[in-house]
Image (tube, rainbow, N blue to C red):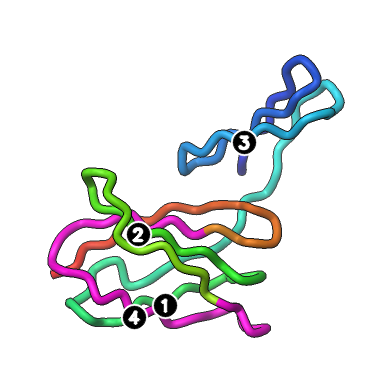
């Protein structure tokens, strides 16, 4: 669950990925918002092997970054009415952070993959 804390007529949305979003003109209070259930697997892949993305509700932005913060890929994967997609990652050996963003409601989930 994502905690939403409302301060001075703004909603500050803290997601597990560390993302901070501000939603203006909100009512005062505190409540929880269910997170998107997007997931990827496997988390350990060979070079040029596809990863599977599950739980897509709409087109999804995939951003892959190296551990030093360099953006390696930043693309939009069309959902085409499906909740699952195969993504050919074409990455060299290493550890990467994969951020998935639902383009309809802007919810983001972060995942770590190891490419061997």
**Mark found first going from the N terminus, 4 or 1:** 1
**Mark found first going from the N terminus, 4 or 2:** 2
Residue at the (56%, 34%) spot, across then down:
20
Residue at the (34%, 80%) spot, across then down:
88
Callout 2: SS? strand
Q: In what quadrant of the picture does the N terminus appear?
A: top right
Q: Is residue 91 magenta?
A: yes
**Residue 52 bears which disc, if any?**
1
Q: In what quadrant of the picture does the C terminus appear?
A: bottom left
Q: Are marks 1 and 3 in contact (CB under 8 Å)?
A: no
The answer to which of 70 and 27 lies nearer the viewer is 70
Looking at the image, residue 93 sits to the left or right of residue 30; the answer is: left
Callout 3: SS? strand
| Mark 4 lies on residue | 88
In the rendered image, the residue lying farthest to the top is 8
**Residue 64 bears which disc, if any?**
2
Estimate how packed mark 2 is, as few (under 14), some (14 to 19) or many (20 or more) residues with alpha carbons within 10 Å: many
Q: Which residues are magenta?
A: 78-100
| Mark 3 lies on residue | 21
Q: Are marks 1 and 2 in contact (CB under 8 Å)?
A: no
**Mark found first going from the N terminus, 1 or 3:** 3
């Amino acid at each position: 669950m994502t905690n939403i804390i409302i301060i001075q007529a703004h909603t500050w949305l803290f997601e597990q990925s560390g993302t901070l979003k501000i939603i203006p003109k909100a009512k005062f209070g505190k409540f929880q918002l269910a997170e998107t259930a997007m997931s990827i697997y496997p988390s350990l892949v060979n070079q040029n092997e596809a990863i599977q993305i599950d739980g897509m509700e709409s087109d999804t932005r995939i951003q892959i970054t190296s551990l030093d913060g360099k953006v390696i890929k930043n693309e939009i994967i069309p959902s085409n009415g499906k909740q699952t997609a195969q993504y050919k990652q074409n990455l060299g050996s290493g550890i990467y952070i994969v951020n998935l963003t639902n383009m309809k409601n802007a919810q983001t989930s972060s995942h770590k993959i190891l490419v061997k």
